[in-house]
Image (cartoon, rainbow, N blue to C red):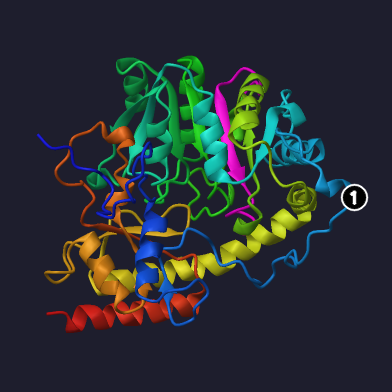
């Protein structure tokens, strides 16, 4: 029986002795295919709804954008592998002020490691895992596939989420998975990329408590944690973090990964952090000593001021005002197009929808993606989010082959133009 790759790409790398074919993540694949059609980053004639970044320019009410990186005399030196201590402390202080006021256990610089971007932080974390079973959810972030497949010490275990249940997964189900499959670690994005499903409030507290009780490490990718569109507990929270529910920062097995990429809208700075128990931070820093050697000193120096409360508040307010409008527009436009949205995104800036009701030839994620390229619109086929680390699962068809991820990261005029083009595509197809 043939093993079918979960990567929708049929493109093979050049054959070279000793090297393997390395698949592209979803966003990189769609960008590469678009480039074959003439796409270049920043080209205003294209509508990139496949992009995994927010608009990075000025937003009404947001603080002024960082426009330069001062180069001091020491900036030419290596930064410590764990990151500049001043930035590590600034990150710890941000979490304590935002999520842990009045709690006896507080994060310190020793609970934080800095590195060059989210994928690298995830790579450090999974490198530090032992020979354990690690649970991960389907669908989830495309880059997890290779990260969970290339490091062979641990065994990735998929946990299926159903669109019929709007991707809900109860605490009781979590407990059964941990006990029944012998999980020692769990990896998830929260809010979820691509579904927008968000675990927050008392539900998130229960997840953290369950992992604490069952000694299961909870590795949480919180890169979209300032893009929150629901308020499950009526607290008015606009940001979500598992840090709010940790009892002891050095004992609870909660590891948080975040950075400036999405929540501060600075993807190009490549600044991320890992927050967790000191022993975990020591381990991921040791992994960094041979994986990457540490991040950019000038970028880290510039990042310290961005964690100021006033900047965080103004930036988050601006994000909510601008992205709420874009979310509302794209939800309505996709519904008019005939896309079935299983769950209006509770967080993040993606809409995950089924195209099965579109005309024949557009009712498949990869087919719609290819047809949309001719209209200069980029989206991401859903099959990329059916992550299959190491190709351990044999599958003939992806459960998400009829799904597509649409980003409302771009500016509103870009979204409007994209939907005009997709409406034209659907009306004239066939």
Compared with 335, 395 (above or below) is above
- Which residue is rendered at x = 43% and y = 46% of the image? 192
Residue 81 appears left or right of 55: right
Front-most of 35 and 330?
35
Would you call the spot at circle 1 few (<14 residues within 10 Å), some (14-19), or many (20 or more)?
few
Disc 1: which residue: 73
Quarter where residue 388 is shown: top left
Majority SS type along the magenta span: loop
- Is residue 108 in view from this perspective? no
Compared with 60, 232 (above or below) is above
Residue 300 appears left or right of 151: right
Residue 167: x and y in percent read 31, 43
Decide whether residue 216 is among the magenta residues.
no
Residue 308 appears left or right of 319: right
Front-most of 315 and 151?
151
Residue 115: x and y in percent read 65, 40
Label 1, secondary structure: give it: helix
User: Split into 4 quadrants, where in the image is the C terminus?
Assistant: bottom left
Front-most of 69 and 134?
69
Residue 347: x and y in percent read 47, 52
User: Split into 4 quadrants, where in the image is the N terminus?
Assistant: top left
- Most extreme residue toward the right is 73
- Which residue is rendered at x = 47% and y = 46% of the image? 191
- Is residue 301 in view from this perspective? yes
Compared with 133, 235 (above or below) is below
Residue 234: x and y in percent read 53, 47
Decide whether residue 262 is among the magenta residues.
yes
Magenta-highlighted residues = 247-265
């Amino acid at each position: 029986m043939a093993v079918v790759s979960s990567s929708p790409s049929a493109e093979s790398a050049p054959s070279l002795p000793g090297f393997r074919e390395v698949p592209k993540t979803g966003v990189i694949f769609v960008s590469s295919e678009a480039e074959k059609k003439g796409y270049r980053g920043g080209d205003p004639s294209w509508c990139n709804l496949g992009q995994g970044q927010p608009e990075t320019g000025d937003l009404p009410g947001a603080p002024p954008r960082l426009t330069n990186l001062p180069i001091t005399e020491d900036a030419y030196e290596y930064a410590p592998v764990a990151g500049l201590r001043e930035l590590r402390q600034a990150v710890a202080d941000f979490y304590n002020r935002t999520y842990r006021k009045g709690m006896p256990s507080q994060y310190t610089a020793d609970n934080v490691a800095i590195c060059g971007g989210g994928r690298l932080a995830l790579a450090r974390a999974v490198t530090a895992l032992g020979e354990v079973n690690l649970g991960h959810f389907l669908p989830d972030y495309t880059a997890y596939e290779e990260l969970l497949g290339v490091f062979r010490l641990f065994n990735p275990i998929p946990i299926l989420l159903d669109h019929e249940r709007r991707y809900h997964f109860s605490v009781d189900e979590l407990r059964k998975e941990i006990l029944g499959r012998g999980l020692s670690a769990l990896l998830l994005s929260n809010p979820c990329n691509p579904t927008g499903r968000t675990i927050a409030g008392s539900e998130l507290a229960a997840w953290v408590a369950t992992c604490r009780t069952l000694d299961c490490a909870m590795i949480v990718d919180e890169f979209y944690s300032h893009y929150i569109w629901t308020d499950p507990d009526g607290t008015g929270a606009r940001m979500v973090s598992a840090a709010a529910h940790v009892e002891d920062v050095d004992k609870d097995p909660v590891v948080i990964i975040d950075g400036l990429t999405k929540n501060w809208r600075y993807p190009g700075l490549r600044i991320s952090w890992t927050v967790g128990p000191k022993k975990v931070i020591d381990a991921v820093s040791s992994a960094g000593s041979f994986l990457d050697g540490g991040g950019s000193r000038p970028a880290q120096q510039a990042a310290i001021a961005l964690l100021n409360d006033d900047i965080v508040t103004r930036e988050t307010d601006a994000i909510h005002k601008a992205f709420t409008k874009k979310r509302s527009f794209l939800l309505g436009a996709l519904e008019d197009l005939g896309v079935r949205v299983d769950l209006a995104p509770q967080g993040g800036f993606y809409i995950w929808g089924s195209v099965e009701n579109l005309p024949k030839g557009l009712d498949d994620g990869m087919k719609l993606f290819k047809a949309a390229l001719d209209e200069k619109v980029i989206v991401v086929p859903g099959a990329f989010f059916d992550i299959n680390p190491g190709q351990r699962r044999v599958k003939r068809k992806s459960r998400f082959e009829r799904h597509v991820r649409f980003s409302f990261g771009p500016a509103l005029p870009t979204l409007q133009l994209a939907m005009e083009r997709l409406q034209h595509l659907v009306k004239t197809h066939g």
